[in-house]
Amino acid sequence: MINIVDLSHQILTEFNNPKVAIDMTCGNGYDTIYLSKIADKVYAFDIQTEAIKNTTKLLDENKVQNVTVIKESHDLFDIFVSENIDLVIYNLGYLPSGNKDIKTETLIVINSLEKVLYQLNTNGIVVIVIYLHNTDESNKIENYINKLSSNFDVMKYQVLNKSDCPYILRINKCK
C-alpha cells in the first residue's frame, strides 16, 4: 500500500538544496521535521496549541534548530516569512487524535495558496495532501489550482482503485 506521507516527502526531495520551506499545517510535526532535514530554514504554522506543543517537542527531542514554529493561521504566513520560498506542504483536515471540529477551511487555504504562489521561487514545489473528510474543500481547492496560469504545472497523485484513500495535489512553479 502506498504511504501518502512518504510520497509527499519524496516529491519534496525533487527540489535541490532548498533554502526556505514552510509546513502550513504542522500538526504533530512529522512534515516539519522532514523539511528540517532537507531545507536550510523552515517555518511551521498551526492554529492549535496542541499542534504547536507536539511539533516543538518533536523538534526538541531531535535537537532541530533550523525551524521557527508559529501559532498562527497559515494564511497569515506572509507576515512572518518575507523571503522567497522553495517548498511548501499542506496536510488538510484536522489534527490526528485532536479535536475534529477544528479543521482547515477552504477559503483560508486558497488565500494562503494565492500568497504562497506569489512568493514561490521558480521550480518551487507546493504539496497539498487531501484527506477525504471534506469533499467540498477538496473540490474547491482543485477548482482553484486547475485555473492557475501556464506558469505552473499541477499534478494529482491518486490511488484509483481505493475510494477512501487520501491523495496529493502538486504545484510546480515553472516561470
Image: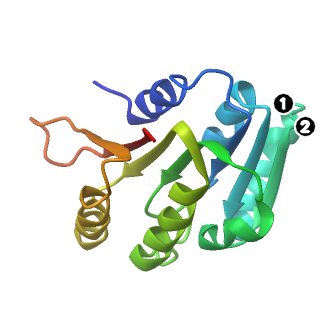
Outermost residue toward the left?
A: 161
Please tell me which residue lies in front, 114 or 109.
Answer: 114
Q: Mark 2 points at which residue?
A: 65
Residue 158 in picture, x, y percent from top left:
22, 38
Please tell me which residue lies in front, 51 or 144. Answer: 144
Q: Callout 2 environment at 10 Å: few (<14), some (14 to 19), or many (20+)?
A: few
Residue 142 seen in the figure: yes
Numbered circle sitting on residue 134? none
Residue 6 higher or lower than 112, as above or below: above
Image spot of residue 63 (x, y percent): 90, 31
Q: Which SS class for mark 2? A: loop
Displayed quadrant of residue 31: top right
Q: Can residue 29 be seen in this view?
A: no
Q: Mark 1 points at which residue?
A: 62
| Circle 1 residues within 10 Å: few <14, some 14–19, many ≥20 | few
Q: Which quadrant is the N terminus positioned in? A: top left
- Residue at coordinates 30% horizontally, 48% vertically from top-left? 150
On the image, which quarter does residue 141 sit in? bottom left
Residue 50 lies in quadrant? bottom right
| x and y percentages locating residue 175 in the rendered image | 45, 41
SS type, badge 1:
loop
Marks 1/2 in contact by CB < 8 Å: the verdict is no
Left or right: residue 76 compared with residue 83: left
- Gap between marks 1 and 2 measured at Cα: 9 Å
Left or right position of 170 against 49: left
Question: Residue 14 location in percent, x, y?
Answer: 50, 22
Could you tell me the amino acid type at mark 1? Asn
